[in-house]
Image (cartoon, grey):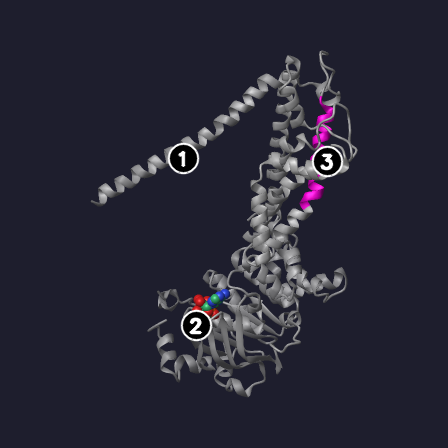
Amino acid sequence: MADSLSRRRRWTNRIMLTLTGVASVLILVPLTLILSYLMTAGSGAINIDFFTQLPAPVGEEGGGMVNALVGTLFLVLLAGALGLPIAVGAGIYLAEARKSPFANLVRFIADVMNGIPSIVTGIFVWAWIVLWMGRFSLLAGSVALAVMLIPMVTRTTEEMVRLVPRELREGGIALGFTRWRTTLGIVIPAARGGILTGILVALARISGETAPLLFTAFGNPFMEWRLNEPISALPLLIYQYAISPYDEWHRLAWAAALVLIALVLVISLLTRFLIKDPHRER
Amino acid sequence: MNAELQPSTMAPHRPSRSPGAEAEASALPPARELESAVEATDFSFWYGSNQALDSISLTVPARKVTALIGPSGCGKSTFLRSINRMNDLIPGIRHEGDITLHGDSVYRNDRDVVQLRKSVGMVFQKSNPFPKSIYQNVAYGPKVNRLVRGRAEMDELVERSLRRAALWDEVKDRLDSSALGLSGGQQQRLCIARALAVSPEVILMDEPASALDPVATQKIEELIYELKHEYTILIVTHNMQQAARVSDYTAFFYMGRLIEMGRTQQLFTNPHEEQTEAYITGRFG
Ligand SMILES: Nc1ncnc2c1ncn2[C@@H]1O[C@H](COP(=O)(O)OP(=O)(O)OP(=O)(O)O)[C@@H](O)[C@H]1O
Ligand SMILES: [Mg+2]
């Protein structure tokens, strides 16, 4: 009896291990497929020009995407500047206020915002900002990306702050610190690594977004960084080039996709290395 | 059920008491006759509709060690946290009666809670050093509370606090490394140093050694014995031997009530109440 039971346990264990093993291999398949395909299709078009030249006119060989690289950089940085203070602040508030009705409302709104399709965000920002300004612009594109960023970072920040053990907070309170001092001086530093990870993951996410930029940043064949001018971005360029009829543009689209993926990978790796909290090791 | 009560887990040591300590202990007067640091009068406490403390009246003598013992859930932590008003953080709480610190009500309306918590330090069951360096852990309280001026004075305060917590020699060469790299016992002593750095009068300890091995526990106990010359110490413990070793007075709580308080020696050898005797001999709890 006991023997058959333990044999059954062993088998269950083996089967489950195999299944989870297979699942983790399967998860690698799309990533490797995408990466290897991008490498073969895109790496041919990657050279110095790609990073330093503006796109060549239709029919001409060569050219690059420096405007899109700069555009993506500006869009993401500005979106971060606009969205992160709000998002981190709201996340800390949610973690502190927990069950207050207002906190529940904010949490609900953040979750709804997280679920809004990005194309809808783009249309809304178009209706508010593009129509109001009368033009597509870097500002409008950044606002659209910030609107996506805020709920993501709000929720991850809240989760990370909540993970800080209650004892740590009580340690501050027991020393006579005010609540905000305890939060800012002890709880947030303890959650810093997690908050930063959430921020970087969200930045990586929005740096690849296309839909919210279609009616906001719009794209621009020239170098641009002014707030009130349309601006190019890597995902926009990929989209435009991919649906074009020209083979040369298709090659460039693959190259841009490769660069975009590399960018996201670099950010993910940065997350790993940057966030070696010196006070976490044991 | 009651691992702490099994003789096999008794730590075989005693704090190294000075000669004559035994005589001193038996000569202790009843707690009421001493200068009191903390005094509870008919203090009752509720979490929502759940009453955790029922009319506690208790005198904690100054510069002595008072132990709180009793079965799990009897309200020891609640009482301790009522003294420095840590329970204020919990929604839906309510109290009746009063607790005073040197005759001054802890609960009066215009009481400065921040000031109160500076004079009543607290050490927790689970050591909770801040995720900062060892130095910063001790210095952060005095810095925030603006107790010292300048780096030199701060250095001196940090060293003094660490020395008093019997930790200085172990950490003096690594003050700038993370506090989380210390052992559990060292972390707990660091938390004691952190509490000492803001110059409290009373130190509340909620099972400070329950997560520590016997050697680290002994260090904490010796430390408590040293500290009582300057500080009033109130310690919650599940470990009967520990209460007997470190405390001058012991209070026995049961189901939210104070059953008995007396000199530790008397309470353990000759308790007045049947429930106390049943508990300390391990017949229930
Ligand atoms: N935050 C809280 N909310 C509601 N009830 C609580 C809370 N904290 C404690 N209680 C209740 O109050 C009573 C006393 O709890 P308390 O923590 O003071 O007991 P204790 O003597 O410290 O127990 P232990 O020895 O297990 O630490 C228990 O019935 C407990 O369930
Ligand atoms: Mg307790």
Q: Amino acid at mark 3?
A: Val
Instruction: Say which residue appears at 64% left-offset and 62% top-offset.
Output: A179
Reply above or below: A120 against A165: above
How far across and how far down the image is residue B151, in percent? 75, 60
Residue B192 belongs to the span the image colors magenta: no
Q: Which SS class for mark 2?
A: loop
Q: Nearer the viewer, mark 1 or mark 3?
A: 3
Is any atom of residue B228 visible in this view?
yes
Q: Is residue B142 left or right of residue B214?
A: right
How far across and how far down the image is residue A199, in percent? 63, 42
- Badge number at residue A169: none
Q: Nearer the viewer, residue B125 or A117?
A: A117
Residues rendered magenta in the picture = A65-84
Q: Which SS class for mark 1?
A: helix
CA gap, disc 1 and disc 3: 48 Å
Respond whether the residues carrying marks 2 and 1 are from the same subunit: no
**Residue highlighted by disc 1:** A20
Residue A70 belongs to the span the image colors magenta: yes
Q: Is residue B7 left or right of residue B148?
A: left
**Residue highlighted by disc 2:** B74
Q: Amino acid at mark 1?
A: Thr
How far across and how far down the image is residue A83, in percent? 68, 43
For marks 1 and 3 on the same chain, the one whose residue lies earlier in the sequence: 1
Respond whether the residues carrying marks 1 and 3 are from the same subunit: yes
**Residue highlighted by disc 3:** A130
Q: Amino acid at mark 2?
A: Cys
Q: Nearer the viewer, mark 3 or mark 2?
A: 3
Q: Residues within 10 Å of mark 1 (few under 14, many from 20)?
A: few
| Residue A240 found in image quarter | top right
Which subunit holds the residue at mark 1? A
Dots 2, 1 in contact, CB < 8 A: no
